Amino acid sequence: MADIQVEEKSKGGKKKPKKGDARVDMTPMVDLMSLLITFFMLTAAFSKPKVMEIVLPEKIKKDEKVEPPKIAESRTLNIILGPEDVVYWYPGKADPDVTVLQETDFSPTGIRQVLLERNRALFRKIDQFEKDVISGKIDIRQDSLRSAISQLKKDDDTGPIVLIKAYKTSKYKNFVDIIDEMSIVGIARYTFTDIDWIEEKLVVDAINRAAPVASGSVQ
Amino acid sequence: MPKIKLGHKSPRIDMTPMVDLFTLLLTFFILTATFRPQESATVDTPFSVSEKPMMDANVMTVLIAKDNKIYFNVDNGPDTILKFRPKILAEMGKRYNIEFTEDELRLFEKTGTSVGVPIQDMKKYLASRDSDEKIALEKGIPIDSADNQLALWILFARQVNPAVQTMIKGDADVPFPVVREVLDILQDKNVNRFNLITSLRVVEVTEEITE
């Protein structure tokens, strides 16, 4: 408005010294500020790392005479983390003569399908439950949702019991990936155990089996 | 007929309120931003689907760097009144018969980064001003059974602050046996609940793929 007034006065014949326009162009300042605000907002929102919680079973001390819990062989699924992002799995109990390790990977069509196949009933239940909550069929508070899902998992008695073992050349990334898969497909029971010599031998066999094939394809 | 000349003035918008608002927001974001000091070890964390944000206080972090060196950090966040860090260092010093002065303890409190220095070199580490010198001293915390300093750090951290939660920040390419060793040490100290620090990745799973 001040500008218009200045304009009018100059029209009216009288020679008045033109009033200096005391305005500062603030556009660059605004530019800079929006840039800085964006920067600080983004760093504030994304700087926080995420954590993944795992609980390992308590170690059995050597002097304690506690038998490790027995689990049904038919429900057991063994997963061995191999070298170079390869995952081996076999069901039941390891037998050096009979057991053949199945080879797969961490892609969505890899180990996830194996787990989903075995965990379908529970996965469906959890999935349906979540859908019902989203669509409003089940009214539940956000904080009790988690415990409701863990209750579902606890009640599960048909799904697989997954034993995860790591071969010595596997990477930490594989370890995180496999726990991730467990939470993606909603496996109720899984744990980490040490790899035993039979399984180690099986892995070595599997690697050797894969090697000649690979070199053959190169030729 | 003289035409009425319109002033060639570009319409101006008064930006003052906008600038006011922006300054306010900027001040807010600058003040709330928490600046974490540069970690001494570079760690590329693996990705996971977990969306749980990391806790701010009552945290101890075991860092496993690319070169398999172990670092340890106690971070009680903005709560410096309780002074956990100097207490833990003093306890460590007592165990190894190293007397840390007040200044050294204060210096350790102020260094927000994780330390990967054997306790024997701690005095030298705290005294050094040069960052190259510091990096040279960082050989990683010993974890072998002869001199398991990581176990002691964990023990004292839990004694000084019983509410402490364990974080493990490992590099994606660390061989698993190293991680297993760290987990074993933690389990020996009766820590069975771990938080693995990861970066977020989004995965959609639908059962349709299988059918």
Image (cartoon, coloured by chain):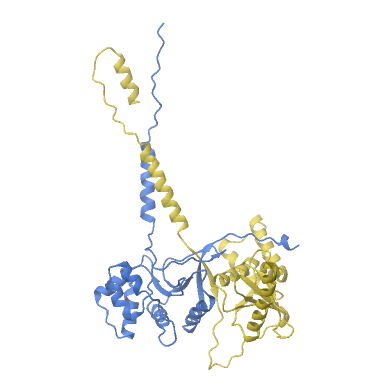
Chain colours: A yellow, B blue
In this rendering, the answer to whether B78 lies above or below A29 is below
- In x, y percent, where is residue A57? 56, 81
- In x, y percent, where is residue A122? 69, 69
- In this rendered view, identify the residue nearer to me: A87 or B180: A87
Task: Tell me if B7 is positioned left or right of A15 in this view.
Answer: right
Rendered image quadrant of residue A200: bottom right
Asked whether the viewer can see residue A160, the reply is no
- Quadrant housing the N terminus of chain A: top left
Task: Tell me if A208 is positioned left or right of B89 in this view.
Answer: right
Task: Tell me if A96 is positioned left or right of B74 in this view.
Answer: right
- In this rendered view, identify the residue nearer to me: B201 or A197: A197
- In x, y percent, where is residue A127? 67, 63
Task: Tell me if B186 is positioned left or right of A218 in this view.
Answer: left
- Quadrant housing the C terminus of chain A: bottom right
Rendered image quadrant of residue A123: bottom right
- Kindly identify the residue that appears in the image at 33 percent across and 68 percent down: B132
- Kindly identify the residue that appears in the image at 32 percent across and 77 percent down: B122
In this rendering, the answer to whether B133 lies above or below A16 is below
- In x, y percent, where is residue A95? 71, 85
How many numbered marks, from 0 up? 0
- In this rendered view, identify the residue nearer to me: A153 or A43: A43
In this rendering, the answer to whether A16 lies above or below B146 is above
Asked whether the viewer can see residue B200, the reply is yes
